[in-house]
């Protein structure tokens, strides 16, 4: 059963504020007492998802959904879209500009890192319109 | 888990409920209800900020009194390098060491050796560690507790190497019990501490092991006695039969510019002050700071010389530190030899790694926790969000959370119940009239 659903807006191209949404989500999840190992994975997923929006899109929304059994993070953006998702999922593949790399982003680890840290992972994208990333992390049965 | 102990106590009779402690606490672990401050033990990280700001002198460190040390047959002082920066420019570590003997210690431990050993153990560990990076120093107990309470995801970043004071305690007990033919229990390993946090790390180590040290005495507790001995005319009484000596490199642990000669400068970052540490930890948690291998963190601004049981202000103390460092003898052969000998035979691995601390409320299930969060969010919206603190919680958000968890009544807010002002008036203004 769905217990909690909250959405957060992410501003594209705003590197100054980058990381704020994942920071906020972290505080919520920590206050909910999510155990450290799961929390760590969730924070990584949230941060990478947020950075992808900041780097490539005009804007986006991240939605946190907590249920009895799992935690989902869904990120939908209005951006350029991904022409070849297979390719984008390869470690080290990156379309980041030099400027982004100079700021320490765009190592081509974003999507692979998210995939690695989630139990379910799905990307949908339409070139010219935007991208949606769905991730799910299962919680241990005893809560 | 055993009941959490803390490095200070609040004297309820002295407490006048002035709330400075509550407002300054970085983990919001203090509430002031009915004019008295009380602690939420599982949130307290022993940083000692409350102790420093209390205007009523109601919060004091739980260090050992000197009289309590008499239960040991042989008392050995392990002095934080911060101690040596507390006195005059011409007071050498050697003379301060002698003064420690004169005030009643039987020996002063060559702590610089242990510091050097841990430096080397850390450098070796960093080289073989596969990640996650950065590794974080654990010699400051506040940093360890901050991670346990507020950054549970970073627990694996804490370097699993013993603090130098711990291996000092272990080795001195071994050596003196052998030399004197008495059991280790009769030897008191006493840390001369710049802060109350190290006291608690001895009383109740974060990793739930037993400390090798027996207790701590605050620098400020013995400052006057040492000063008197230092200034006493004539030669110090330093008794020839008592064993102590100092080797060269005494000072690099107390200063924030801690030297880790074996770590490359660009991959090593020293940090002091809780506010800055929290900023950097937030970045680490988000996966930034990928190029840093090792963070040396000290919760006190300026490092251990800025500890709340020191006497000298940190700028003067640091300048003395620099002077002491400049004048220290070139590494002596005996020091090098001792470091080499012990490095080869001792194990520096932390016996048990610390775990995230269980916070109250985690015992209820996720569903209940979500309900509480929603309730707290709704309550928060109805509060003024001025963080005036008059309800007895440091922020409106804390008050909303307390109410949602059933720990406080919403009516404690003066904006929601004007009677509360009447109550507070009689509590605070009434009290002032009577004395």
Image: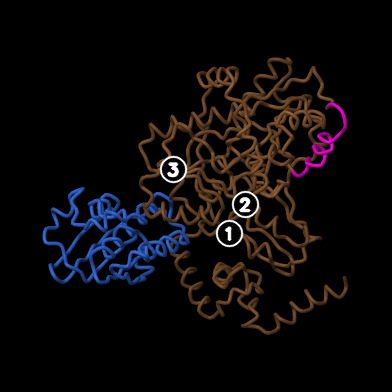
Chain colours: A blue, B brown
> What stretch of residues is rendered in magenta?
B220-235
Residue linked to disc 1:
B26
Same subunit under labels 3 and 2? yes
Q: Tell me if residue B227 is in the magenta stretch.
A: yes
Relative image position of residue B289 (x, y in whole percent): 38, 49
Q: Tell me if residue B179 is in the magenta stretch.
A: no
Is label 3 or label 1 in front?
Answer: 1
Whether residue B210 appears in this view of the structure is no
Same subunit under labels 3 and 1? yes
Quadrant including the C terminus of chain A: bottom left
Relative image position of residue B13 (x, y in whole percent): 81, 60
Relative image position of residue A140 (x, y in whole percent): 37, 52
- Say which label, 2 or 1, has the lower sequence index: 1
Quadrant including the N terminus of chain A: bottom left
Q: CA distance from mark 3 to mark 1?
A: 22 Å
The answer to whether marks 2 and 1 mark residues whose Cβ atoms lie closer than 8 Å is yes
- Say which label, 3 or 2, has the lower sequence index: 2
Residue linked to disc 3:
B156
Q: Check the image and report above or below for A25 versus B65.
A: below
Numbered disc 3: secondary structure: helix
Residue at 64% from the left image edge and 72% from the top image edge: B389
Same subunit under labels 2 and 1? yes
Is label 3 or label 2 in front?
Answer: 2
Residue at 58% from the left image edge and 49% from the top image edge: B299
Residue B265 placement: quadrant = top left
Say the numbered circle drawn on residue B157: none
Label 3 resides on the chain identified as B
Q: Main secondary structure of the magenta part?
A: helix
Q: CA distance from mark 2 to mark 1?
A: 8 Å
Label 2 packing within 10 angstroms: few (<14), some (14-19), many (20+): many
């Amino acid at each position: 059963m769905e217990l909690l659903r909250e959405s957060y807006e992410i501003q594209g191209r705003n590197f100054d504020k980058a990381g704020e949404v994942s920071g906020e989500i972290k505080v919520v999840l920590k206050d909910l007492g999510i155990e450290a190992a799961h929390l760590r994975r969730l924070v990584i997923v949230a941060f990478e998802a947020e950075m992808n929006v900041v780097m490539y899109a005009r804007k986006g929304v991240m939605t946190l959904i907590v249920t009895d059994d799992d935690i989902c993070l869904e990120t939908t953006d209005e951006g350029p879209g991904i022409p070849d998702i297979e390719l984008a999922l390869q470690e080290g593949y990156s379309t980041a500009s030099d400027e982004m790399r100079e700021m320490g982003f765009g190592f081509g680890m974003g999507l692979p890192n998210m995939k690695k840290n989630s139990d379910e992972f799905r990307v949908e994208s339409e070139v010219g319109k935007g991208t949606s990333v769905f991730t799910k992390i299962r919680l241990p049965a005893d809560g | 888990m055993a009941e959490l102990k803390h490095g200070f106590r609040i004297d309820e009779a002295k407490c006048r409920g002035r709330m400075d402690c509550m407002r300054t606490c970085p983990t919001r672990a203090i509430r002031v209800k009915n004019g008295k401050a009380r602690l939420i033990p599982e949130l307290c990280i022993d940083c000692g900020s409350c102790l420093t700001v209390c205007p009523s002198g109601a919060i004091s460190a739980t260090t050992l009194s000197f009289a309590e040390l008499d239960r040991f047959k042989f008392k050995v002082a392990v002095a934080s390098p911060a101690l040596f920066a507390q006195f005059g420019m011409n007071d050498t570590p050697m003379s301060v060491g002698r003064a420690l003997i004169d005030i009643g210690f039987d020996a002063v431990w060559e702590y610089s050796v242990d510091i050097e050993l841990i430096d080397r153990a850390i450098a070796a560990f960093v080289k073989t560690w596969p990640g996650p990076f950065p590794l974080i120093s654990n010699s400051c107990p506040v940093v360890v507790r901050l991670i346990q309470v507020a950054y549970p995801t970073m627990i694996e970043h804490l370097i699993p190497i013993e603090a130098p004071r711990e291996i000092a305690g272990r080795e001195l007990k071994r050596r003196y019990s052998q030399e004197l033919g008495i059991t280790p229990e009769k030897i008191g390993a006493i840390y001369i501490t710049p802060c109350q946090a190290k006291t608690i790390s001895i009383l109740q180590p974060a990793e739930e092991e037993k400390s090798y040290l027996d207790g701590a005495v605050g620098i400020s507790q013995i400052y006057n006695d040492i000063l008197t001995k230092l200034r006493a005319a004539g030669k110090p009484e330093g008794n020839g039969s008592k064993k102590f000596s100092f080797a060269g490199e005494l000072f690099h642990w107390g200063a924030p510019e801690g030297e880790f000669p074996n770590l490359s400068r660009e991959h090593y970052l020293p940090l002091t002050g809780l506010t800055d540490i929290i900023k950097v930890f937030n970045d680490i948690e988000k996966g930034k700071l990928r190029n840093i291998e090792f963070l040396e963190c000290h919760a006190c601004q300026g490092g251990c010389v800025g500890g709340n049981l020191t006497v000298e202000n940190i700028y003067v103390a640091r300048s003395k530190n620099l002077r002491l460092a400049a004048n220290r003898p070139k590494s002596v052969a005996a020091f090098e030899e001792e470091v080499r000998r012990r490095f080869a035979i001792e194990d520096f691995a932390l016996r048990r790694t610390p775990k995230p601390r269980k916070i109250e409320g985690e015992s209820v299930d996720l569903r209940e926790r979500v309900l509480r969060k929603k309730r707290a969010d709704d309550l928060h919206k109805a509060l003024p969000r001025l963080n005036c603190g008059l309800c007895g919680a440091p922020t409106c958000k804390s008050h909303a959370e307390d109410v949602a968890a059933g720990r406080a009544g919403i009516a404690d807010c003066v904006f929601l119940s004007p009677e509360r002002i009447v109550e507070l008036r009689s509590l605070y203004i009434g009290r002032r009239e009577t004395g």
